[in-house]
Image: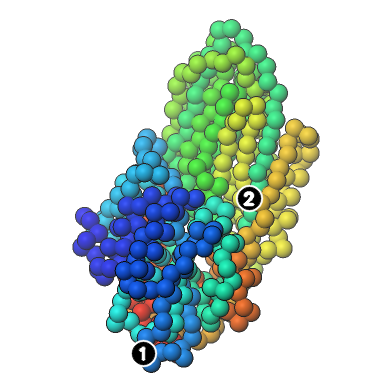
Amino acid sequence: MDLSTLTPAPLWQHFEKICALPHPSGHEEAVAEYLLDFAREHQLEAHREACGNVIILKDASEGYGKSPRVILQAHMDMVPVAAPGVRHDFLRDPIHPVLHEDGTVTAQGTTLGADDGIGIATMLALLEDESLQHGPLTCIFTVEEETTMKGAMGLDPRWLQGDYLINLDSEDTGLIFVGCAGSCDIHMTYRPAFEELPLGARALKLHLTGLKGGHSGTDIHRGHANAIVELSALLKSLTARYELSLISFTGGQAVNSIPASATATVVVDTLKANAFKQDLLLAFEKVRAAHQEQDPGMRLEITEAKVPLKGMSSASLEELTALVDSFSLGALAYSAVDASIVQDSCNLGLISTVKDEVHLTLMPRSLDKDSLPRLVALQTDNAVCRAIGDKLSFTCTPPHGAWLSPSDNALIRTLKQHWQEITGTPLTVTVLHAGLECGFFVEKGPASLQLISIGATIAYPHSPDERLDSRGAAQILALMQRTLAHLK
């Protein structure tokens, strides 16, 4: 089934066009040009900022000149993740959306980019609706939300002069968010010792795949296995019986995604190689059984590889696996306000071997911005890190700020009223354990600016299983139309 059967047609036409344009983080140029062409076609004032953001302005409709100025916001970039075995060039190949009988939309073997392509499509559908009644509108389309927050950080504060800001980047139909978690990236470098490898040794490539992965904020509490952690643990369990040398270790595709696959190449004595493979598979069966419910597709492939001249010493492999084991990962604490919401978490999103170094990247998150230094210390100043000493170093990116706005105002009351009319269900106000650009906007904008975030359900964002609720997306557009018309 294709998206042409869905209504309202403008929403899905724009979404399909965005899917056809390459737009991973740092490569939003095609989408930016699409937005600027749209503005020219509809005779709307538009601006392109030096950082890459696009701003489109629309005057109030007749009789709404004194209505509050509403700022609508979404980001242009997507997380580019392909399923194992799927070849996809995210800088050239279009995303192929597929409509399922249950009304959900996925992509063929990749992330869909509904995060936040559906937010962009919603804004464009509102801007081109000549029958829409509304006050003055500012539409902000930012770049690199999924990686550096470049757009949010580089946004000129003049575009935040308004009464309300509606971020269209959250992913739960029926929820309205008035706060989000802050975060930072920890870039860690481990410098192992290397040694010459004996003649006649065997190299084996271990490929752990089939995990669900998911968003490192909104899915962190679901118990999905982390492929880097599980593969490291498998190696750690066998280092006492086998003198292994590590050649390479790679895993993860984005720091804000729970890794769904990881690969390690090890060298083992030829005479012990078959026993090692047998023990490894036995250990893996225990891991698979432990995660059968959350990650039923988990599998381990073992293939032969070429033996290089040197590899990481067995002592260094033991240090590396101990380091990974020392991290405090997953959901670490829950909110005292709402026990169902994660307060603190950390994700190990990336590992790679580059020349003679191992690079690891972690992302701690917290609803309390003052907790981030403590979460960083959990990962970087534990007993294992101290024991490794100067072979380990790290840097942290500037923190993405946490944000909290009032949970009751004229905008929220209007949204609640019309959501009840559209769906027959209440709209719940809560906070989100993930990063939103609102954390930057609240610091840049005037003190009077009140912010909320809303959006249709997107299951498994940042993974090839990403799934958009099309009915919820249409309801969000209808909610925006009614809310803008009644917000005076």
Residue 180 location, quadrant = bottom right
- Number of on-image labels: 2
Classify 204 as above or below 334. Answer: above
* Residue shown at 32% from the left, 72% from the top: 42
Residue 269 place in picture, x, y as percent: 58, 12
Residue 177 shows which numbered tag?
none
Crowding near the residue tagged with mark 2, few <14, some 14–19, many ≥20 C-alpha atoms within 10 Å: many
**Is disc 1 placed on a helix, strand or loop?**
loop
Which residue is the site of mark 1? 62
- Whether residue 391 appears in this view of the structure is yes
* Residue depth check, mark 2 versus mark 1: number of the one nearer the observer: 1
Q: Looking at the rendering, in which quadrant would you find the N terminus?
A: bottom left
Q: Looking at the rendering, in which quadrant would you find the C terminus?
A: bottom left
* Residue shown at 48% from the left, 18% from the top: 305
Residue 386 location, quadrant = top right
Residue 13 location, quadrant = bottom left
Q: Is residue 9 left or right of residue 124?
A: left
Is 287 or 221 nearer to us in this picture?
221
Q: Residue furthest top?
A: 199
Residue 242 place in picture, x, y as percent: 62, 19
* Residue shown at 51% from the left, 20% from the top: 204
Q: Earlier in the sequence, mark 2 or mark 1?
A: 1
Crowding near the residue tagged with mark 1, few <14, some 14–19, many ≥20 C-alpha atoms within 10 Å: few
What amino acid type should be assigned to the residue bearing mark 2? Asp
Classify 254 as above or below 266. Answer: below
Is 83 or 57 nearer to us in this picture?
57
**Is disc 2 placed on a helix, strand or loop?**
loop
Which residue is the site of mark 2? 185
Residue 80 place in picture, x, y as percent: 44, 47
What amino acid type should be assigned to the residue bearing mark 1? Glu
